[in-house]
Image (spheres, rainbow, N blue to C red):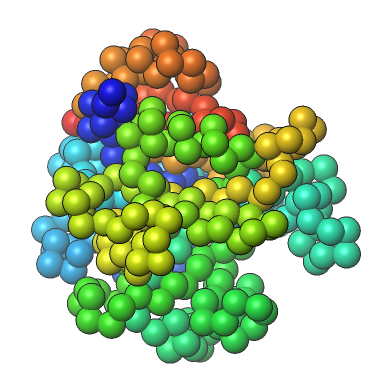
Amino acid sequence: MTAIGRRYNASFQQTMLRIKDPKVSVPFYERHFGMKLVHRYDFPQWKFSLYFLERPRDAAAAALPSPGTKASEAYLWSMTGTTLELTHNHGSEEDDSFSVWSGNCGSDLPAESPLFRAGVVRGFGHIAFNVEDVYATSAALEAAGVAFQKRPDEGRMKGLAFCLDPDGYWIELVKREEGLFPEPQNLSQTMMRVKDADRTIHFYRDILGMDLVRAMHIPGDFTNYFFANLTPAQREAMADPESAEARAAVKTLWQPVLELTHNHGTEKDDAFHVHTGNSEPLGFGHIGFLVDDLEATCKEMEQAGVPFHKRPQDGGMSSLAFALDPSGALLCGAVPA
């Protein structure tokens, strides 16, 4: 049976992060990662603004409409790419005590870890960009004043790095094949931790219709599952997700994947609950998908047992809905313009 999401052409369209100051965060992503502000919304009555950034192909960047216009709004809700949705609550930029939670500090780490934090379990992990040379990119970013959580030769995993955005969110730098794209980087992943691997695979593959493109197993420790919305041609060319070839195949994609990390054994721990970032401490908010028919998609998902935080008919915004994945993470669904 065809997955619900595939019947309604669900496509991964956004990752929402709360930020302190858009005058710092938006230029950071534009300057260092080639992203473009494709649209913004301002809601002065509710005291927040939304900034949507995309890393487009260079050839398409010049044709993007001016952000904040009807044309840019239409582009946002009909695009085939994926954005970062940066959410700014007005006044936070002037609050010295304001900070966001990166998702990488929690009580599920050993007490002696510098990332241990009581009262919360790690959830969101990072976004990532693929680059041809992680070492050169890291050096250039550090020379430009960008802070690092991990340099390429630090730690056990050599050759990959994690820099930090202005709010402390982790940005992984991953090596891709040389000459694959002319652009220096491409937005390549959003990583979230999950409680139960089997339920998560069923949800994202069998209900949302995403393709499982890679499974990376670390026996006795954790497994990373990579999901993408593939075109029929990409699906035909993709390697078996359990094969050695899958690692390289995933890096040939321009569009980002969802990297879902399962730490083995959490599915058996009734007390274990991933922190979603939508209660204190606040940080990551949700991932989002465009669908052809929001009402029909949500109706079928609810019939399949998916819980909802907001249905299309709830509240004043009928073009949006929020479902919950098996770990409680919010998924925003929206109707294309």
Residue 145 visible in the displayed image: no
Question: Looking at the image, which residue is at 51% across and 65% down?
Answer: 171
Q: Quadrant of the N terminus?
A: top left
Q: Is residue 111 left or right of residue 157?
A: right
Question: Looking at the image, which residue is at 64% across and 83% down?
Answer: 154
Q: Is residue 264 left or right of residue 229?
A: right
Q: Residue 174, how many percent across, how many down?
A: 44, 72
Question: Looking at the image, which residue is at 46% across and 31% down?
Answer: 203
- Seen in the picture, residue 7 relative to 89 is either above or below; the reply is above
- Please tell me how many numbered marks the rendered image carries: 0
Q: Residue 77, how many percent across, how many down?
A: 24, 37
Q: Quadrant of the C terminus?
A: top left
- Seen in the picture, residue 167 relative to 155 is either above or below; the reply is above
Q: Is residue 67 left or right of residue 326?
A: left
Question: Looking at the image, which residue is at 57% across and 82% down?
Answer: 158
Residue 328 visible in the displayed image: yes
